[in-house]
Amino acid sequence: MAKKAMIERELKRQRLVAQYATKRAALKEIANDENLPMEERFKARLKLAKLPRNSSATRLHNRCQLTGRPKAYYRKLKMSRIMLRDLASNGQIPGMVKSSW
């Protein structure tokens, strides 16, 4: 089980990303528009830099929804390999059985 603080920090980042997504996208569009004057583009970059760092989507990290484990994460299932194996062994994931030969 991951530390509660790490899980909460990740949830806080997700909320910030959702909160600032439209503002960040608008500023990025202005900053990358070649047709606008250089001063206006520079001001947009400065405003973008003033936004909280954790509002950037690149700072998010995938975590297992059951345990909070950050490594060995399956995107499709939103869980770590350890929980996937446990649930499959207990028969809680339909259609998945432990292989043996």
Image (cartoon, rainbow, N blue to C red):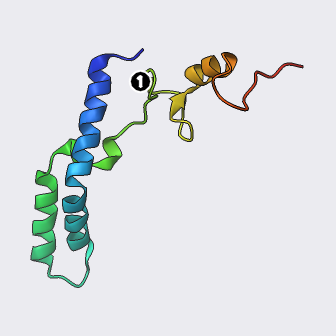
Q: Amino acid at mark 1?
A: Gly
Query: For this rendering, which residue is in front, 77 or 52?
Result: 77
According to the picture, the residue beneath numbered tag 1 turns out to be: 68
Query: For this rendering, which residue is in front, 90 or 7?
Result: 90
Question: What's the residue at 85%, 19% (across, down)?
Answer: 100
In percent of width and height, residue 10 lies at 30, 32
In percent of width and height, residue 30 lies at 20, 73
Image: 44 above or below 36: above
Q: Residue furthest right?
A: 101
In percent of width and height, residue 101 lies at 90, 19
Give the secondary structure at mark 1: loop
User: Which quadrant would residue 11 be assigned to in this image?
Assistant: top left
Image: 101 above or below 94: above
**The N terminus appears in which quarter of the rendering?**
top left
Q: Classify mark 1: residues with Cα within 10 Å, few (<14), some (14-19) or many (20+).
A: many
Image: 25 above or below 82: below
Q: Residue furthest bottom?
A: 35
Question: What's the residue at 68%, 31% (across, down)?
Answer: 94
Label tally: 1
Question: What's the residue at 56%, 41% (across, down)?
Answer: 76
Question: What's the residue at 60%, 25% (across, down)?
Answer: 84
